[in-house]
Image (cartoon, rainbow, N blue to C red):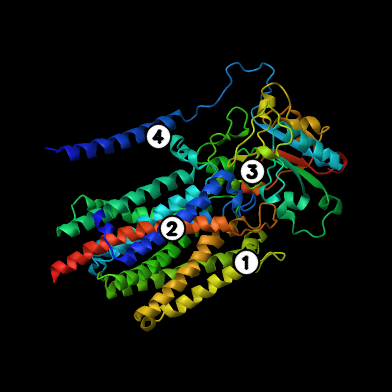
């Protein structure tokens, strides 16, 4: 099937060339990091994780969101998701690949990363995260490829794939739960030490991921003859709306507990992020932007007649995606490190090279996504040709 | 069941990958408790069930008192002096009362002398270390024999999870190449490379040949080192006699450094 990605319009090849060029720039930046160390990033001994780990965390959510299509389609027989579910599965594949690359980019000694498998440590959450992420990657690749292959031949998918599909449901929940446990089990970081962390992660994943999927589905429809279905897009819009309300609600719970309890350690990270501490306000505009974008997206999405209009829905989804990208891809990780263990403030901002590497990883993700979607679209376009 | 060559090769290659992977995982898990040990231990080696420190800050008065301990440690262990504070590597350092005990920083009317007092901070060698719990490669581990929280800089993958987990900021990461920042290299102790985490290892290499940790040796009695499990040890006697506090005990890691703040007469 992969050969279908090898024939395309000039526009397709121009897009591939662009992504390859951005990837190349990212690789050059990474070579510098590899030889000079992580000192080329904005990270420090106080803020020892930054943009890479933030992006990793955010993208695990995007990957997990495929389950929001799998559950209605396979468990509730919601037929309208029949065409779009493959887009969710392939989005998950590219998101997990980006996750793995961001982890690799963050390693001080990437050549030694096999030590995680050579010296397996079940007590470490990282060990389980490696297991569930790679498992999820395989599951989605196998499920997506097999069902699409069957589709191309006009036959039913083989029976053995059904149990894998059912397995992928709890597995999707597990990748984001385990990723939340990376943070929620650390005793000294008040900002992360919260029982609703995994719930928050899932809520933000199930709004941000499907929002991205709506945008992608609309792009696919615009640039190809494959129509994922207007009703399917509307149904996902509903999922995005509910999940985003749950996400904002859970964030509100964090604020209540921190400020009503009045425990300084619990309040400080929130104060740093939203008001600044002792004149350290680098993240304040960004966090308020995230909050405003969240409110704007919800103010649109909550009215069914507004989100019925696909242009308005697309706008709301872009706004919502940006809001969550800031909140989870940036604020959540940095906030855990500020103030530091001595109640001092060392601020963080990504460097130019760090940003280039980050964009490079996104380019690889989009490259994988483009190739997979090209295959899926080509198969689906053939389908419709047969049907008519 | 018949199988063509293509199917056979697919199955064979898949089962090889799974088999080799599973075998390596299982063999490493079963090794589990293996611990590095010397073939011929020095009979002079200092031994304990759980090493700990009592730091009496009333005996640290001048800047020189602090620097002697810090320099002794950093020189012996080839700790680089990175000029950039964001990338600083330190195994033992001096810090204020408010930073050492941040949960008491809200108190604005406390004893001024105490508020202005400086402390010596280093790895707490916790009985229940959070850093060890999170490490994905066992590069940091708790030595069963004497409770030292060790750091294997050759196994460390530089994920910095231990830095996120340590409640005491005791860990440093080599953001840049440490070697150019070592003024005089001690050939008896390894230098580190870029991208690994390091910290105080309670001078395990000195204990093995019967020497006290370097900071304790240089401290003129301000740092006392001994076995916390031995009721007759000097550290236990000091803890029994004087009022001592530990950093962030509420976190539950059970730090092994006890601080004495005042002289004996006020305690």
Q: Nearer the viewer, mark 1 or mark 3?
A: 3
Q: Which mark is residue A259?
A: 1
Q: Nearer the viewer, mark 2 or mark 4?
A: 2
Residue with the mark numbered 4: B25
Q: Nearer the viewer, residue A317 or B59?
A: A317
The alpha-carbon separation of the residues under discs 3 and 4 comes to: 29 Å
The alpha-carbon separation of the residues under discs 2 and 4 comes to: 39 Å
Q: Residue A117's x, y, as percent?
A: 43, 38
Would you place residue A90 above or below residue B217 in this image?
A: below
Q: From the viewer's perspective, tell me whether residue A95 is left or right of residue A293.
A: left
Q: The residue marked by circle 2 belongs to what chain? A: A
For label 1, the SS is: helix
Q: Residue A181's x, y, as percent?
A: 49, 52
The alpha-carbon separation of the residues under discs 1 and 4 comes to: 46 Å
For label 2, the SS is: helix
**Label 2 vs 1, first from the N-terminus:** 2
Would you place residue A145 above or below residue B79 in this image?
A: below
Q: How many C-alpha atoms fall within 10 Å of the one at disc 2: few (<14), some, or many (≥20)?
A: some
For label 3, the SS is: loop
Residue with the mark numbered 2: A21
Q: How many marks?
A: 4
Toward which corner of the image does residue A42 lie, by quadrant?
Answer: bottom right
- The residue at the far front in this view is A10
Q: From the viewer's perspective, tell me whether residue A384 is left or right of residue B235.
A: left
Q: Residue at x 76, y 53 (%)?
A: B98
Residue with the mark numbered 3: B171
- Pointers 3 and 4 in contact (C-beta within 8 Å): no
Q: Nearer the viewer, mark 2 or mark 1?
A: 2
Are discs 2 and 4 located on one and the same chain?
Answer: no
For label 4, the SS is: helix
- Pointers 1 and 4 in contact (C-beta within 8 Å): no
């Amino acid at each position: 099937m992969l050969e279908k990605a090898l024939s395309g319009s000039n526009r397709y090849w121009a897009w591939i060339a662009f992504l390859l060029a951005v990837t190349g720039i990212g690789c050059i930046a990474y070579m510098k990091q590899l030889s000079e160390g992580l000192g080329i990033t904005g990270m420090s001994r106080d803020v020892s994780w930054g943009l890479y780990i933030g992006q990793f965390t955010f993208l695990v959510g995007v990957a997990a969101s495929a389950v929001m299509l799998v559950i209605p389609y396979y468990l509730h027989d919601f037929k309208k998701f029949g065409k779009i579910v493959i887009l969710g599965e392939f989005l998950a594949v590219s998101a997990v690949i980006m996750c793995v690359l961001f982890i690799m980019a963050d390693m001080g000694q990437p050549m030694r990363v096999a030590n995680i498998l050579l010296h397996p440590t079940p007590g470490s959450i990282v060990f389980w995260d490696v297991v569930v992420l790679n498992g999820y990657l395989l599951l989605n690749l196998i499920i997506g490829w097999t069902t699409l292959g069957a589709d191309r031949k006009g036959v039913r998918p083989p029976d053995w794939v059904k149990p894998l599909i059912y397995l992928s449901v709890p597995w999707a929940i597990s990748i984001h739960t385990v990723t939340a446990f990376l943070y929620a089990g650390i005793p000294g970081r008040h900002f992360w030490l919260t029982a609703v962390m995994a719930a928050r992660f899932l809520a933000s994943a199930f709004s941000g991921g499907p929002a991205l999927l709506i945008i992608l589905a609309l792009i696919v429809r615009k640039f190809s003859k494959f129509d994922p279905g207007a009703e399917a897009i509307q149904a996902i819009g509903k999922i995005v709306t509910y999940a985003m309300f749950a996400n904002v609600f859970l964030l509100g719970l964090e604020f209540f507990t921190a400020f009503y309890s009045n425990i300084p350690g619990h309040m400080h990270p929130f104060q740093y992020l939203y008001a600044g501490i002792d004149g350290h306000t680098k993240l304040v505009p960004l966090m308020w932007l995230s909050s405003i974008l969240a409110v704007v997206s919800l103010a649109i999405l909550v009215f069914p007649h507004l989100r019925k209009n696909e242009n308005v829905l697309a706008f709301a989804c872009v706004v919502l995606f940006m809001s969550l990208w800031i909140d989870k891809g940036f604020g959540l990780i940095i906030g855990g490190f500020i103030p530091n263990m001595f109640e001092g403030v060392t601020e963080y901002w990504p460097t130019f090279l760090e940003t280039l590497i980050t964009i490079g990883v996104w380019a690889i993700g989009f490259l994988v996504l483009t190739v997979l979607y090209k295959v899926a679209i080509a198969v689906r376009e053939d389908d419709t040709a047969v049907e008519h | 069941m018949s199988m063509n060559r293509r199917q056979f090769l697919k199955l064979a290659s898949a089962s090889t990958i799974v088999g080799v992977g599973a075998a390596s995982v299982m063999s490493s898990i079963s090794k589990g408790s293996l611990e590095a040990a010397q073939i011929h231990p020095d009979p002079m080696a200092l031994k304990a069930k759980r090493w700990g420190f009592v730091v009496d800050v009333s005996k640290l008065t001048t800047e020189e008192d602090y620097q002697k301990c810090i320099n002794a440690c950093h020189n012996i262990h080839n700790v680089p002096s990175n000029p950039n504070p964001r990338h600083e590597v330190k195994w033992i350092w001096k810090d204020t009362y408010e930073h050492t005990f941040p949960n008491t920083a809200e108190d604005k009317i406390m004893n001024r002398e105490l508020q202005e007092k400086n402390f010596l901070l280093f790895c707490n060698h916790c009985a229940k270390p959070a850093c060890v719990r999170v490490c994905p490669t066992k590069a940091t581990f708790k030595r069963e024999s004497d409770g030292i929280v060790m750091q294997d800089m050759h196994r460390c993958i530089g994920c910095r999870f231990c830095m996120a987990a340590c409640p005491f900021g005791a860990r440093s990461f080599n953001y840049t190449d440490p070697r150019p920042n070592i003024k005089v290299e001690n050939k008896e102790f390894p230098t580190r490379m870029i991208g690994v985490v390091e910290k105080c290892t309670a001078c395990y290499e000195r204990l093995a040949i019967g020497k006290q940790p370097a900071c304790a040796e240089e401290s003129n009695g301000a740092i006392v080192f001994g076995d916390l499990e031995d009721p007759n040890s000097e550290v236990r006697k000091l803890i029994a006699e004087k009022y001592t506090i530990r950093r962030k005990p509420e976190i539950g890691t059970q730090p092994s450094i006890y601080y004495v703040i005042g002289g004996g007469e006020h305690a």
